[in-house]
Image (cartoon, rainbow, N blue to C red):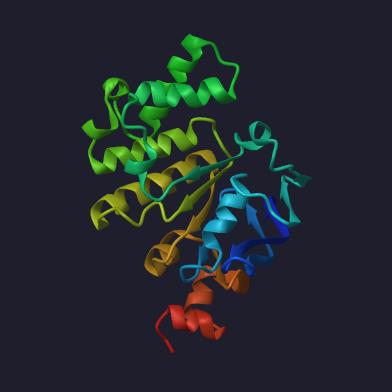
Amino acid sequence: MSRLLEVVSLSKHYRKQLGLFRQTTIQALNNVSFSLGAAQTLAVVGETGSGKSTLAKVLVGIEQPDEGEIRLAGQAVTLSHYRKYNHVIRYMFQDSERALNPSQKVGSMLDHVLRFSTVLDEPQRQQKVLQSLQQVGLMDEHIDFYPHMLSAGQQQRLALARALILDPKILILDEALTVLDPTLRAQIVNLLLELQQKNGLSYLLISKNLRLVRHISDHCLVMQHGQVVEAGDTEQLLNQPQHPHTRKLMGLS
């Protein structure tokens, strides 16, 4: 399996004030390493505060790591150079409704991404916007809709269109399917799997839903207190968990 993304010894800590003269250090990530292949899905699971979302924010450049290296197709990336690699890794937020600008029409929202990150002219951008809507099952007329005019499922599809409009190699789903009801979740999961098969997309799925993890991921990392405590093939890991924390997450201990 070719390694599209490699994370090597990634660490991140925060300083927290405990009054006027005291501070404590919170180790959000501690020596985290893993790899993700092309057209693969890697799930990251763990309790709240385990470091899952910090990992996602570091990977897309929202946060800077204290130590470690991130490689894309074998090349180390400088996270501060956002425009250089935001075509490769994109991020889909947990709550699509809150992540969408309520005062901006769908077409303008998608066009803004293209104006910021590409050299396409206006007709090319217009064509790309329509292609992106069609890719996720939305219609051309949705270009003139505001987010509140869309259903919850359509809002999720719009969020997906915005994440995919730069044709990334990797999409990070940070609890992005959690807020959906089971029917809508199944629709979006089927769409994600279809896009993966068609375009070779890789997903980093951050989720507490182990049923979802089992259904769509190839490999799984289990995190606790900023560290990876267990990793492996999803089916094997969930069927035969070795670490006590994994067994706890599965309700086996």
In the picture, residue 145 is in which quadrant? Answer: top left
Q: Is residue 40 visible?
A: no
Quadrant holding the N terminus: bottom right
Left or right: where 198 falls relative to 135: right
Quadrant holding the C terminus: bottom left
Question: At 52% from the left edge and 69% from the top edge, which residue is drawn?
Answer: 234
Residue 237 place in picture, x, y as percent? 53, 75
Question: At 26% from the left edge and 57% from the top edge, which residue is drawn?
Answer: 182
Q: Is residue 203 visible?
A: yes
Question: At 24% from the left edge and 53% from the top edge, which residue is drawn?
Answer: 183
Residue 12 place in picture, x, y as percent? 67, 60
**Residue lying furthest front in this view?**
20
**Residue lying furthest bottom in this view?**
253
Relative height, residue 101 to residue 241 (above, below): above
Relative height, residue 70 to residue 225 (above, below): above
Left or right: where 75 falls relative to 53: right
Residue 20 place in picture, x, y as percent? 59, 65
Residue 245 place in picture, x, y as percent? 52, 81
Q: Nearer the viewer, residue 239 or 25?
A: 25
In the picture, residue 54 is in which quadrant? Answer: bottom right
Question: At 49% from the left edge and 72% from the top edge, which residue is drawn?
Answer: 235
Left or right: where 62 falls relative to 181: right
| Total count of labels | 0
